[in-house]
Amino acid sequence: MSIGIIGSGQIGSAFARALARNGIRATIANSRDPESLAALQAELSPFITAGTREQAAGADIVLVAVPWEKLNGALAGLPDWNGRIVIDANNPVEPSFRKAELGGRVSSAVFADAVPGARLVKAFNHLQPHLLSGDPASDGGRRVLFYSGDDAAAKEAVGGLIERLGFFGIDLGALAVGGKLVEFPGGPLPALNLVKLG
Ligand SMILES: NC(=O)c1ccc[n+]([C@@H]2O[C@H](COP(=O)([O-])OP(=O)(O)OC[C@H]3O[C@@H](n4cnc5c(N)ncnc54)[C@H](OP(=O)(O)O)[C@@H]3O)[C@@H](O)[C@H]2O)c1
């Protein structure tokens, strides 16, 4: 399955580093042109390629890691998602660090409005970037990554990717449940650096 990344900041580039260290290819895009990603591409060559937002969005699995207030702009005008898998790695935090207004909904439900027709999985949003890009083998075990979603096959694909990256994936169930548990701010799980022993 091809992988795209929209957002090349702390989380997008940490995810790219995790892919590259496992020999997995992906296309990464930001708000500028691909040349702006030359240094990251050189660092993660030959696995990570800089591309346009449209190229990244055309992959089978697309991780989106963009500041909450910029999500609509980052996802506007893209071709139909057509059942492709989108990983929501975002947190509903405003620049002031206050929680964004979600109208009582879980943040992934709000995010879903910007990617109509996509199969959404919430993942890669609860760890600090260096823990995502670093070695998931820790203290004799594997670092835990949570994921949740409403589409079983999409969740299985993302769970498989998490395993390939060397993490221990924990399926938190549906978006309404898991999305709430990992939501930052508010949920009990964000920023917990957990390791599955044995
Ligand atoms: N940092 C953390 O510790 C952390 C942890 C977990 C989850 N998160 C969540 O992850 C998301 C990203 O956070 P971050 O810390 O990685 O942010 P960041 O370092 O500020 O990077 C944001 C990225 O989004 C890109 N972007 C902005 N507008 C865009 C557009 N219109 N089209 C394409 N790309 C666009 C930026 O492109 P340019 O480079 O061109 O500006 C940049 O590469 C947020 O929702 C955040 O809440 C962050």
Image: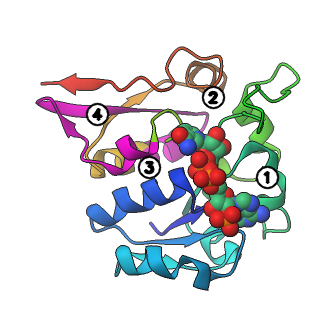
Circle nearer the N terminus (4, 1): 1
- Would you identify the image quadrant in which residue 167 lies? top left
Query: Circle 1: is it few (<14), some (14-19), or many (20+) Cα within 10 Å?
Result: few
Q: Residue at x 76, y 26 (%)?
A: 98
Q: Is the CB of the residue bearing disc 3 within 8 angstroms of ligand 1? A: no
Query: Circle 4: is it few (<14), some (14-19), or many (20+) Cα within 10 Å?
Result: many
Q: Is the CB of the residue bearing disc 2 within 8 angstroms of ligand 1? A: no
Q: Quarter of the image containing the C terminus?
A: top left
Query: Circle 2: is it few (<14), some (14-19), or many (20+) Cα within 10 Å?
Result: many
Q: Is residue 145 above or below residue 195?
A: below
Q: Residue furthest front?
A: 96
Query: Circle 3: is it few (<14), some (14-19), or many (20+) Cα within 10 Å?
Result: some
- Disc 1 to disc 2, C-alpha distance: 22 Å
Q: Which residues are magenta?
A: 129-158
The residue carrying mark 1 is: 70
Q: Nearer the viewer, mark 4 or mark 1?
A: 1
Question: At label 4, which amino acid type do we have?
Answer: Arg
Q: Nearer the viewer, mark 2 or mark 4?
A: 4
Q: Is the CB of the residue bearing disc 1 within 8 angstroms of ligand 1? A: yes
- Disc 2 to disc 3, C-alpha distance: 16 Å
Residue 35 x/y as whole percent: 59, 85
Q: Can you see residue 87?
A: no
- Disc 1 to disc 3, C-alpha distance: 27 Å
Q: Residue at x 56, y 25 (%)?
A: 182
The residue carrying mark 4 is: 143
The residue carrying mark 3 is: 157
The residue carrying mark 2 is: 175
Q: Is there a contact, CB below 8 Å, between mark 2 and mark 3?
A: no
